[in-house]
Image: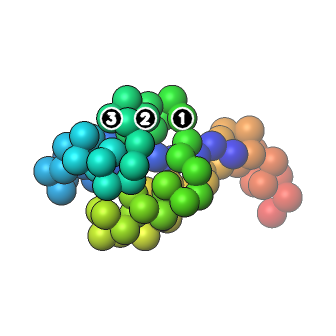
């Protein structure tokens, strides 16, 4: 399974700068950039802070999505 990440999209939609979010969460802007660009995942605590600041649920930012391999396996079971 892969983690779907909508942080970058939500930052644009809500017109929030990475630096502004970083200050609220207590991390560097570079850390937020890495998370937004799918190079890193936040800790649970930071994921909760990010979601709170954006006014959304954690699941609205990150969710699990099956990759092609998983879909084939699950499709064969049905």
Q: Which of marks 1 and 2 is in front?
A: 2
Nearer-N-terminus badge (1/3): 3
Report the front residue among 36 and 29: 29
Nearer-N-terminus badge (1/2): 2
Q: Residues within 10 Å of mark 3 (few under 14, many from 20)?
A: some
Report whether 61 appears left or right of 55.
right
Q: How crowded is mark 2: few (under 14 residues within 10 Å), some or many (20 or more)?
A: some
- Give the labeled residue for mark 3: 29
Residue 36 shows in this picture: no
Residue at 69% across / 45% down in the picture?
1
Please tell me whether residue 52 is drawn above or below residue 77 in the rendered image: below
Q: Is mark 3 on a helix, strand or loop?
A: helix
Q: How crowded is mark 1: few (under 14 residues within 10 Å), some or many (20 or more)?
A: few
Report whether 42 appears left or right of 56.
right
Report whether 5 appears left or right of 75.
left
Where residue 42 sits in the image (x, y, percent)? 53, 46
Report the front residue among 11 and 46: 46
Residue at 55% across / 42% down in the picture?
41
Residue at 74% across / 46% down in the picture?
70
- Give the labeled residue for mark 2: 31
**Figure quadrant of residue 34:** top left
Label 3 – label 2 distance at C-alpha:
5 Å
Q: Residue 40 — which label? A: 1
Where residue 19 sits in the image (x, y, percent)? 25, 40
Q: Residue 48 — which label? A: none
C-beta proximity under 8 Å, tags 3 and 2 = yes
Q: What element carries label 2?
A: helix
Residue at 19% across / 50% down in the picture?
16
Label 1 – label 2 distance at C-alpha:
8 Å
């Amino acid at each position: 399974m892969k983690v779907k990440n909508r942080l970058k999209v939500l930052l644009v939609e809500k017109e929030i700068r990475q630096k502004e979010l970083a200050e609220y969460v207590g991390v560097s802007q570079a850390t937020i950039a890495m998370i937004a660009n799918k190079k890193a995942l936040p800790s649970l605590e930071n994921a909760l802070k990010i979601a709170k600041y954006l006014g959304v649920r954690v699941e609205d930012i990150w969710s699990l999505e099956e990759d092609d391999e998983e879909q084939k396996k699950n499709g064969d079971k049905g």
